[in-house]
Image (tube, helix red, strand yellow):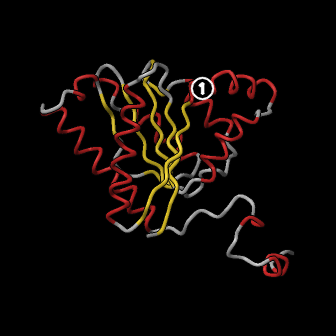
Amino acid sequence: MSTRTIAVVSAGLSNPSSTRLLADRLTAAAQAALAERGITATVEVVELREHARDLADNLLTGLANKTLQAAVDTVAGADAVIAVTPVFSASYSGLFKTFFDVLDKDALVGKPVLLGATAGTARHSLVLEHAMRPLFAYLRATVVPTGVFAASEDWAGGTEAGRGLADRVDRAAGELADLVAGRPPAAPADPFADPTTSFEDLLRGTP
């Protein structure tokens, strides 16, 4: 089986949070869908609340410390991204937006991305289309067709709402797996760290 890396970005503020819960469900479903396609997925989670101060410092100084840089590199180097935010004032959280503001403008080009959002009421469900999808279109990511929104009532197991959430999670995970399976693995950030390429070949390809 081949291996791919999924970076999971969760912008939940509490611990535990419904945002992280949705991120975990999406991740488990994506891993299962990839396994059905002969791909093993390793997961790296970026919990944004742990980087809130670092992100504020980055906005002021333009510099990322080692901890934040590691999180940025995790997302930039992944084969796919699952990004989940709570909804505040009918849009993604400021913490969520700030993280994607500090990414390099080309970090997500062509990268498969699955979007998710949580809120207390279904009235916020259009956040996926009017806020999140345009953001990732600007970043030139390849966003799966199905976004997953979860309101408070969606967490009740055995209910129609709960079954609807489960169906959306599985459908979105399958779409992400299809995109990941159709792409080669992400190239290593450092070409000299690639064990499959000889030093002579690397030099030969240098202008």
Give the quadrant of residue 96: top right
Q: Position of residue 140 (x, y in %)?
A: 57, 52
- Residue that appears at 52% across and 55% down: 5
Q: In the rendered view, does 1 fall on the left or right side of 172?
A: right
Q: Nearer the viewer, residue 130 or 103?
A: 103
Q: Position of residue 97 (x, y in %)?
A: 57, 31
Q: In the rendered view, does 41 fall on the left or right side of 44?
A: left
How many residues crowd mark 1 within 10 Å: few (<14), some (14–19), many (20+)? Answer: few
For label 1, the residue is 50
Which quadrant of the rendered structure holds the C terminus?
A: bottom right
Q: Amino acid at mark 1?
A: Glu
Q: How many marks?
A: 1
Which quadrant of the rendered structure holds the N terminus?
A: bottom left
- Residue that appears at 52% across and 40% down: 45
Furthest residue toward left: 159
- Residue that appears at 59% across and 47% down: 139
Q: Position of residue 163 (x, y in %)?
A: 17, 38
Give the quadrant of residue 155: top left
Please tell me whether residue 44 is drawn above or below residue 160 in the rendered image. below
- Residue that appears at 49% across and 53% down: 42
Q: In the rendered view, does 167 fall on the left or right side of 8?
A: left
Secondary structure beneath dot 1 equals: helix
Q: Position of residue 94 (x, y in %)?
A: 56, 23
Please tell me whether residue 3 is drawn above or below residue 152 in the rendered image. below
